[in-house]
Image (spheres, grey):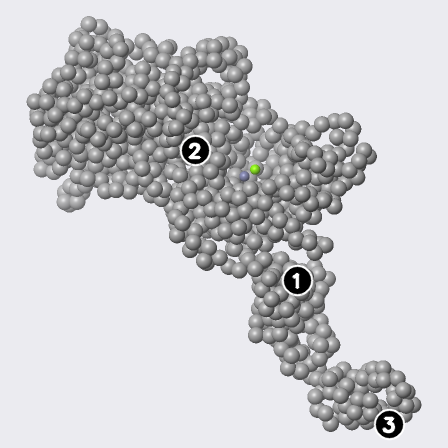
């Protein structure tokens, strides 16, 4: 089992997805099956191979420093599950 | 390694503070790093948010060329290596003011590498501080926690604004050095025009990494004090934090590596509870952005266009204007004061201009608690005053009176001199008449002066008094010497 | 099926131009077919008002002589493309009733050329799947049935709604996206043509992201020519997507010369995978024979790292997805499940909002990027990707195109593989390497399986050489003469 239940718990926390205790075992099994299968990549010698950075060769294009903008306050907040006075609102965050 | 003169005495011996700083400087640009939304401070909530900044589904970043150039300029200004190829990574974490669920930053391959700057210390010494790197990244939005009892309010206006994170080497050993470092970085950024350096508006924030150790020992565990937003607070935060760590260690405790906040009201640092959970940012290259490749020709062009920076200016002021290194240092430390000085000195006696700017002018500003930008006396007016001194229209002493009136009323010096009749008396006949009158009235003093030539000072004083201070001092001295036969 | 829905895109275009039919008639016919297709579950949102309004406007433009290249042609849109004012969900609960205020570049390009939107089509949740069974709206059903069973079959995935709608004549064509085979495999399962252009050919702006370095939009149609026509409009440089390439889009229809004499077609030996079924092998051999008799030269080539493509894909794609899907947090749009504090809200929202397969992939992606595993998994996979791209590059020194099967099997039954993620993943064995290398690929129907289901062949081209790909695909299409149609069972009461 390459991904044990504690690991599932830890990555679920990182990914911010609630996982119940009952779901831990099946998830651990599923993820382990998949990750055990990808282990076969270890057969390939990649010591001198650069990782791929862009799939087709092209140069990055840049944008001019020009403001292209309308006040989108209504548009960006109109799909919000909760908003008030043009703010998005969330349960209070304690720092 | 040089001896550290800044050791702190604890109950069990002396300690050394070691500090490195991460400065987040907002890039001076019209639009954000990856969107066309504006960057102005203080707009209505969520009114400067593009679809990209709000991370709506399917939105993609497009990099702002000017932000890249500003980073290169800054790198050059810090004497640092410019990397022609750099990579944008995603730093993944969840926070309500981070709409994408990741910050686009540069992790492994930043746009600027190692550099070095010099900082001036109060004892007149100069210290070199290493720059580790500079990278470009997005700012987050802002959460407001005090508007509602159970909710936080999120404003994404800042979301996506371009920041330069400038990371120093752990080269600083006392609060003064850290403060001087921040001032110097701010000064360089302002000269370059790459950041306005406004700490109140958050355009420049410092994270201070503080650790303590016994002199000569390995580095201790550090704590990071986040987002300190004034030079004064940086000093207070460091003093407090170093003392706290020493107390913990001397009590036999150990330091936890953690993020802390400085509370300016309490004057202390405290642990950020919400950030305590272990971070795993899962950095990886942003697949929406190709590697950032810039051409050497662009770097060369930007280097050629760089303005004169504070260190170069200081050297030139000493060399060309004959200013003392101290005066030159004071003048160049802030771009605003240096610009002011250069406007005052333009076409006038630079030494006199430097004396006036660093002396009367700064003194008056300080006393009034004013910034140079809100000075009631303009550079042109101060320059005019200096011209009035140089062409003998008024004496230096009268000039000080005129300056006081200028500072109060904002009037031009020529107008004040005219209205108050302060024009210097250069009419030799008038001065001679005054001298004759005093000599005639004080024969005993004349006798004494022949024995004691220093008595001439008394006569100068009398002449000035009778001319209302307006007599040309040089003429008075010459005529007196002649009349008294000295 | 009416006479109007029988038409190909190209035929309809001709009839519209000749004013033999109107766009409103054509659109009404397709809307009627779509409304009668609930059993297929291909459309998740039908937009008749929008469609008829656009059709009427098209008819007006045709009357004024201002017709665009796609004027009046009704199309379906995968629910992964954001459509202004029309609910867009990626078939995920987490998007709830999200209604964009903007239009994806690809669909905007289609509408600018005069096309008519019929509605939004089903897909696997966030395009993660090969059977369209992970959709929040339930599985889409393949219009085809096997001769020996009445079981409902999958239409392939993730663009199952697109392939099913086109196969069932519920649209003249449909937009789709392909991250690991999601255009070509469903095309193969439904007897349609599916084309994935070169990465960078179509803008990704406004399309819900799954895996940014792999995602690419393309058409599903009923003929190769129709694919060329749709792609011409969908493609093009977009300054809002800096990974979209700034080169001219050729006139793809001009590529159909019908002449492939001297063209070198590579047959990669590694695609002859262990356990390949006889009928797939036979189809492939038949395809080789057709191309050969059309004058192409057949060359054996080797793509030695082929077997590592799938495991590398199942690292790279989930890694990118785990980050791309972090924005679905219940703050600015979509579903929110209330929680005691902010973290609780995130965790509950994302647990309820994401289905099993999405959750699985987000967790895998999070794991392979996490501290201590990044180099072993993510970097390793990106290095494998370099090797796979090099394999293709070397092959293209010797050949102009590659011919392979599209999928290892015909369409399978709904529910057959849904609980076995790994066997589901193996569906993409022939399509995934193409995405990893960013190449263009096309699947076209070439025959029927022993139980009467369509099977596709895949041609793979050089980067940005879609023209050669289409030219050969046209010849192969002609040779195959595939004309089978599913029997229309879904309109029965
Ligand atoms: Mg930092
Ligand atoms: Zn930073």
| Residue B173, picture quadrant | top right
Chain bearing mark 2 = B
Q: Is residue B284 visible?
A: yes
Q: Is residue C133 visible?
A: no
Q: Mark 2: which secondary structure?
A: strand
Ligand 2 under 8 Å from disc 3 Cβ: no
Q: Mark 3: which secondary structure?
A: helix
Answer with mark 2 or mark 1, whichever residue precedes in sequence: 2
On the image, numbered disc 1 is attached to which residue? B325
Q: Is circle 2 on the same chain as circle 1?
A: yes
Answer with mark 2 or mark 3, whichever residue precedes in sequence: 2
Residue neighbourhood size for the residue with mark 3, other residues' Cα within 10 Å, grouped as few (<14), some (14–19), many (≥20): few
Front residue of this view, candidates B40 and C478: C478
Answer with mark 1 or mark 3, whichever residue precedes in sequence: 1
Q: Which mark is residue B285?
A: 2
Q: Report the residue at 46% width, 35% height from top.
A: B89
| Residue B50, picture quadrant | top left
Relative to B8, say whether B400 is above or below.
Answer: below
């Amino acid at each position: 089992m390459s991904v044990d239940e504690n690991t599932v718990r830890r990555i679920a926390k990182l990914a911010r997805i609630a996982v119940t205790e009952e779901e831990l075992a099946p998830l651990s099994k599923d993820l382990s099956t998949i990750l055990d299968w990808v282990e076969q990549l270890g057969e390939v010698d990649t010591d001198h191979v650069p990782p791929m950075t862009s799939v087709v060769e092209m140069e990055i294009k840049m944008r001019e420093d020009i403001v292209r903008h309308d006040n989108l306050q209504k548009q960006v907040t109109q799909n919000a599950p909760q908003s008030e006075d043009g703010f998005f609102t969330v349960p209070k965050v304690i720092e | 390694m040089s001896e550290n003169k800044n050791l702190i005495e604890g109950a069990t011996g002396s300690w050394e503070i070691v500090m490195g700083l991460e400065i987040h400087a907002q890039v001076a640009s019209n639009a954000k790093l990856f969107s066309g939304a504006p960057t102005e401070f203080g707009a209505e909530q969520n009114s400067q948010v593009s679809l990209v900044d709000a991370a709506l589904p399917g939105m993609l970043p497009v990099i702002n060329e000017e932000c890249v150039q500003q980073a290169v300029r800054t790198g050059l200004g810090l004497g640092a290596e410019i990397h022609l190829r750099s990579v944008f990574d995603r730093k993944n974490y969840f926070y309500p003011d981070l709409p994408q669920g990741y910050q686009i930053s540069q992790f492994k391959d930043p746009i600027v590498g190692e550099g070095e700057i010099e900082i001036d210390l109060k004892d007149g010494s100069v210290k070199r501080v290493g720059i580790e790197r500079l990278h470009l990244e997005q700012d987050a939005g802002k959460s407001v926690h005090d508007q509602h009892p159970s909710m936080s309010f999120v404003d994404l206006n800042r979301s996506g604004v371009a920041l330069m994170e400038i990371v120093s080497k752990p080269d600083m050993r006392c609060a003064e050095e850290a403060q001087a470092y921040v001032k110097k970085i701010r000064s360089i950024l302002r000269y370059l025009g790459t950041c306005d350096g406004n700490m109140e508006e958050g355009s420049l924030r410092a994270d201070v990494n503080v650790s303590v150790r016994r002199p000569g020992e390995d580095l201790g565990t550090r704590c990071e004090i986040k987002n300190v937003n004034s030079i004064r607070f940086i000093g207070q935060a460091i003093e407090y934090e170093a003392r706290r760590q020493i107390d913990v260690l001397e009590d036999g405790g150990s330091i936890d590596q953690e993020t802390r906040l400085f509370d300016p009201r309490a004057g202390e640092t405290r642990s950020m509870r919400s950030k305590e959970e272990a971070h795993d940012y899962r950095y990886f290259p942003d697949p929406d952005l190709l590697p950032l490749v810039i051409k050497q020709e662009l770097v060369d062009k930007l280097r050629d266009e760089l303005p004169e920076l504070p260190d170069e200016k200081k050297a030139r002021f000493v060399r060309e204007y004959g200013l003392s290194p101290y005066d030159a240092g004071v003048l160049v430390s802030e771009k605003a004061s240096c610009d002011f000085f250069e406007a005052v000195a333009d076409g006038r006696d630079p030494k006199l201009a430097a004396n006036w700017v660093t002396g009367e002018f700064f003194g008056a500003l300080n006393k009034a608690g004013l910034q140079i930008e809100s000075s009631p006396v303009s550079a042109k007016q101060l320059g005019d005053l200096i011209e009035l001194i140089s062409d003998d229209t008024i004496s230096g002493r009268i000039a000080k009176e005129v300056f006081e009136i200028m500072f109060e009323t904002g009037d031009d010096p020529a107008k004040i001199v005219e209205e108050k009749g302060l024009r210097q008396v250069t009419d030799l006949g008038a001065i001679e008449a005054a001298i004759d009158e005093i000599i005639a009235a004080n024969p005993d003093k004349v006798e004494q002066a022949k024995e004691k030539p220093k008595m001439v000072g008394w006569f100068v004083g009398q002449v000035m008094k009778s001319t209302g201070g307006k007599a040309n001092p040089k003429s008075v001295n010459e005529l007196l010497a002649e009349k008294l036969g000295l | 099926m009416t006479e109007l829905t029988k038409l190909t895109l190209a035929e309809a275009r001709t009839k519209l131009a000749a004013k033999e039919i109107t766009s409103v008639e054509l659109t009404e016919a397709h809307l009627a077919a779509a409304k009668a297709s609930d059993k297929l579950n291909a459309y998740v949102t039908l937009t008749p008002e929008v469609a008829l309004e656009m059709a009427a406007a098209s008819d007006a433009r045709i009357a004024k002589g201002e017709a665009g290249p796609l004027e009046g042609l009704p199309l379906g849109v995968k629910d992964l493309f954001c459509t202004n004012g029309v609910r867009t969900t990626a078939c995920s609960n987490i998007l709830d009733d999200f209604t964009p205020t903007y239009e994806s570049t690809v669909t905007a390009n289609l509408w600018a050329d005069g096309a008519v939107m019929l509605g939004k089509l089903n897909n696997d949740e966030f395009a993660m799947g090969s059977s369209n069974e992970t959709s929040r709206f339930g599985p889409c059903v393949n219009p085809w049935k096997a001769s020996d069973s009445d079981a409902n079959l999958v239409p392939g995935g993730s663009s199952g709604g697109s392939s099913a709608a086109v196969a069932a004549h519920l649209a003249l064509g449909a937009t789709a996206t392909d991250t690991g085979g999601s255009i070509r495999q469903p095309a193969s399962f439904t007897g349609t043509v599916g084309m994935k252009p070169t990465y960078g050919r179509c803008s990704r702006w406004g399309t819900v992201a799954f895996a940014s370095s792999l995602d690419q939009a393309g058409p599903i149609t009923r003929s190769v020519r129709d694919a060329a026509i749709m792609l011409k409009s969908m493609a093009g440089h977009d300054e809002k997507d800096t990974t979209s390439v700034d080169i001219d889009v050729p006139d793809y229809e001009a590529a159909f010369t019908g002449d492939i004499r001297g063209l070198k077609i590579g047959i990669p030996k590694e695609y002859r995978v262990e356990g390949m079924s006889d009928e797939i092998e036979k189809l492939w051999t038949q395809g080789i024979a057709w191309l050969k008799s059309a004058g192409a030269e057949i060359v054996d080539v080797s793509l030695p790292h082929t077997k590592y493509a799938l495991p590398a894909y199942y690292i790279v794609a989930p890694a990118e997805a785990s980050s791309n899907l972090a924005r679905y947090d219940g703050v600015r749009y979509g579903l929110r499940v209330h929680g005691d504090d902010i973290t609780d809200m995130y965790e509950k929202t994302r647990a309820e909002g994401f289905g099993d397969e999405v959750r699985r992939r987000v967790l895998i992606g999070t794991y392979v990027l996490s501290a201590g595993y990044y180099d072993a998994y993510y970097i390793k996979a990106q290095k494998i990707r370099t090797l796979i791209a090099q394999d293709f590059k070397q092959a293209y020194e010797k050949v102009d195109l590659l011919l392979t099967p599209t999928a290892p099997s015909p369409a399978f039954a709904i529910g057959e593989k849904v609980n076995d993620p790994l066997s589901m993943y193996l569906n993409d064995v022939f399509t995934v390497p193409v995405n990893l290398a960013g190449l263009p690929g096309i699947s076209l129907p070439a025959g029927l399986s022993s139980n009467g289901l369509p099977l596709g062949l895949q041609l793979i081209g050089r980067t940005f050489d879609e023209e050669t790909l289409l030219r050969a695909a046209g010849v192969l299409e002609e040779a195959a003469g595939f004309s089978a149609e599913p029997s229309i069972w879904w309109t029965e009461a």
